[in-house]
Image (cartoon, rainbow, N blue to C red):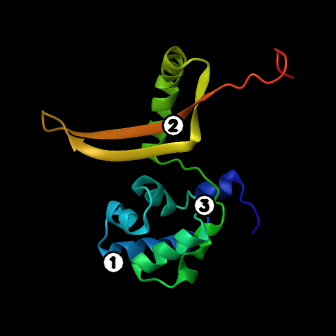
Amino acid sequence: MEPMSNADYLTRLQHADELKKLKAAKKASGLTYAELADKVDVNKVWLASVFDGQQYVPEEYCAKIAEALGLPEEDTIFLSEHPYKGNTDPILYRLHEVIDTYGPAIKSIIHEQGGNAIMSAIDFGIDVNVITDKEGNHRVLIELDGKLLPYAKKGKYPWK
């Protein structure tokens, strides 16, 4: 497959037709992302991202998704290709805004509480829920759970 430019990506999602068919099968199944994730034995947020073409899916999970939705495996195998990631959706824009606004403060607190370290995005967990607060307002609750990775001190300082 030929790589897409950023401009092409923003106007035409990779595997748009296949993803449309996959989303239709999910809708027809009546399953929520949480219910489907339980059947496939994966995280619901990760699975929802799969349906947006934003994740690489190992072939054994392509087969599990196909089975859970009653699809032939050839209808999900495209998910095992590494996708081009990104979007300009308003929710995604707001998430970027949150990180732009609070990221430096989060970084400071991580260093203050965890020392000279970073948060892993590989050894990582994520969850999203919509809850109702005491006043009856709907709130979005996002949990990010990344392993704390201390910086390695290899060689002489400054590291070369």
What residue is drawn where x is 63% and y is 59%? 83
Secondary element under disc 2, as helix, strand or loop, is strand
Q: Residue at x 47, y 73 (%)?
A: 65
Quadrant in which residue 42 is drawn: bottom left
Residue 69 in percent (x, y) is at 41, 78
Q: The C terminus appears in which quarter of the rendering?
A: top right
Amino acid type at circle 1 is Ala
Which residue in the structure is indicated by mark 3? Answer: 56
Residue type for callout 3: Tyr
Residue position marked by numbered label 1 in the rendering? 28
Q: Residue at the location (39% across, 39% down)?
A: 143
* Within-10-Å neighbours for mark 3: few <14, some 14–19, many 20+: some
Please state if 137 lies on the left or on the right of 64 as rendered. Answer: left
In the picture shown, does residue 23 fall above or below 151? Answer: below
Question: Earlier along the polypeptide chain: callout 2 or callout 3?
Answer: 3
> What residue is rendered at 47% in x and 48% in y?
89
